[in-house]
Amino acid sequence: MVAEIKEACGVDAHHKTIVKILKEQNIISIVAAKRPNLTATQAANRLRFVRSKENFAFDDWKTWTFSDESMIELDCAEGVQRFLITPQQRYMPEFVIGKKQQGGGKVMIWSYISYDGLGPLIFIEGGIDAKVYIDILKTYVLPHCLTCLAENGAVQTYMDDGASSHDSELVIDFCSRKGIQRPYWPSSSPDLNPIEHVWGWIKHKLTRLKAKPKNLTELKSILVRFWEEIKLESIQKLFVGMPKRIKAVKDANGWNTNK
């Protein structure tokens, strides 16, 4: 990128000199952030939500269970794009790269986290529709919520995002009949969901593998191993940080944050 600047400006200077000048102006080369491309309506909904939760303390979040699914690529690699900007500009809409699906072999994983630890790592074959999601709720979420209620009397609030399979009438009816408490959750809000950090940990470890998985069977085996290596204290720190996460979105007026 420094070479491109030299060519565009017609400057014949050592690259270290150019880098020094840019740093003096607080301009650095930053990898483009990958966040959803928010609309003004989505940002307003996010802001409304965090304002309703700004008085939540850490103890309030301890009774929440956060779930999500994630797509993992076989090649374990993600392309990057760089911008010459100030650190404060990184999460401005024009410098955020929208998430998109990549080609090639991939697996979909689903799980949840609670203050008590990780849920099971589930591999989803063929995607999630309402029927598949109800099976997940029945098999994994409902027993978890009932166990927490039996052990400490705390009613779990179960969070999932606004995917169409999550908000079908069948799913809403099932949760209502079984007493699964699902709050409103603003769309396109991975920075509010702490399980996104767990996916990030796993993907980061995958990119650092010297021997990449050769097929989906090997990839699944590695994912299970990484999942089992995650420590309870790491999960609990994510819950401790929820008030800061809420504040960051409020300070950003509902737009993307670095959380």
Image: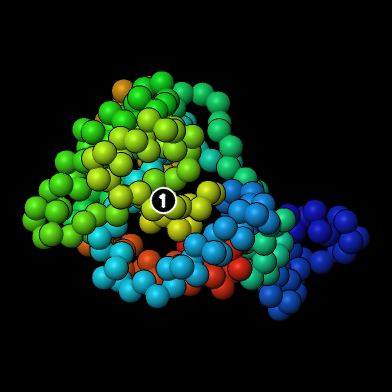
What is the quadrant of residue 41 in the picture? Answer: bottom right
Q: Is residue 96 visible?
A: no
The image's colour scheme reads rainbow
- Density class for disc 1 (Cα within 10 Å; few <14, some 14-19, many ≥20) is some
Q: Residue furthest left?
A: 151
In this rendering, would 92 be left or right of 181?
right
Q: Position of residue 258 (x, y in %)?
A: 52, 63
Above or below residue 160? Residue 214 is above
Judged from the image, the secondary structure of the residue bearing numbered disc 1 is helix
Callout count: 1
Q: Residue at x 77, y 55 (%)?
A: 3
Q: Residue at x 38, y 66 (%)?
A: 242
Give whichever of 256, 250 is nearer the camera.
250
Q: Which residue is mark 1?
A: 196
Q: Residue at x 46, y 68 (%)?
A: 52
Q: Residue furthest bottom?
A: 24
In this rendering, would 73 be left or right of 254?
left
Q: Position of residue 250 (x, y in %)?
A: 54, 70
Give whichever of 87, 99 is nearer the camera.
99
What is the quadrant of residue 94 in the picture? Answer: bottom right
Give whichever of 114, 212 is nearer the camera.
114
Q: Residue at x 54, y 49 (%)?
A: 188
What is the quadrant of residue 132 in the picture? Answer: top left
Q: Position of residue 8 (x, y in %)?
A: 88, 56
Q: Is residue 152 visible?
A: yes
Q: Position of residue 157 (x, y in %)?
A: 29, 54
Q: Residue furthest right?
A: 10
Mark 1 residue type: Glu
In this rendering, would 133 be left or right of 156?
right
Above or below residue 215? Residue 237 is below
Give the quadrant of the N terminus.
bottom right
Give whichever of 255, 159 is nearer the camera.
159
